[in-house]
Amino acid sequence: MKTITEKDIRSIIQQILSVLSYLHEKSIVLKNFKLDNIMLETAGMNSAKVNNDFNIKIVDINEAEHYK
């Protein structure tokens, strides 16, 4: 298992902020956004990936809501 470095954490946080920014641009709010709903994917979990970077997946977005 790969050790998570400061560089990895920076990448993860940037991905989370990017997702939230995108949703905000689309006027969507996640009403139940919490750490429990963030999943990490590593290269070992997906053989198509060729590097050791982490990708995030935000799950349980059933309570997302469009706002005006």
Image: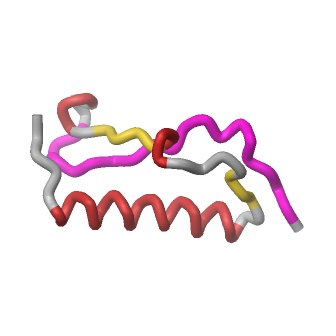
User: On the picture, is 6 further left or further right than 35?
Assistant: left
Q: Residue at x 55, y 37 (%)?
A: 59
Residue 45 percent across, percent down from the top left: 25, 29
Residue 31 percent across, percent down from the top left: 71, 51
Whether residue 4 is situated above or below residue 45 in the rendered picture: below
Residue 68 percent across, percent down from the top left: 89, 68
The quarter in which the N terminus is drawn is top left
Q: Nearer the viewer, residue 46 or 58?
A: 58
Q: Residue at x 80, y 51 (%)?
A: 65
Total marks shown come to 0
Which colour style is shown? secondary structure
User: On the picture, is 48 further left or further right than 32?
Assistant: left
Q: Which residues are magenta?
A: 49-67
User: On the picture, is 40 further left or further right than 67?
Assistant: left
Q: Residue at x 69, y 70 (%)?
A: 25
Inspect the magenta stretch and tell me whether residue 14 lies in it.
no
Q: Nearer the viewer, residue 16 or 52?
A: 16
Q: Residue at x 34, y 47 (%)?
A: 55
Q: Main secondary structure of the magenta part?
A: loop
Whether residue 48 is situated above or below residue 58 in the rendered picture: above
Residue 18 percent across, percent down from the top left: 49, 66
Inspect the magenta stretch and tell me whether residue 51 lies in it.
yes
From this viewpoint, which residue is outermost toward the right? 68
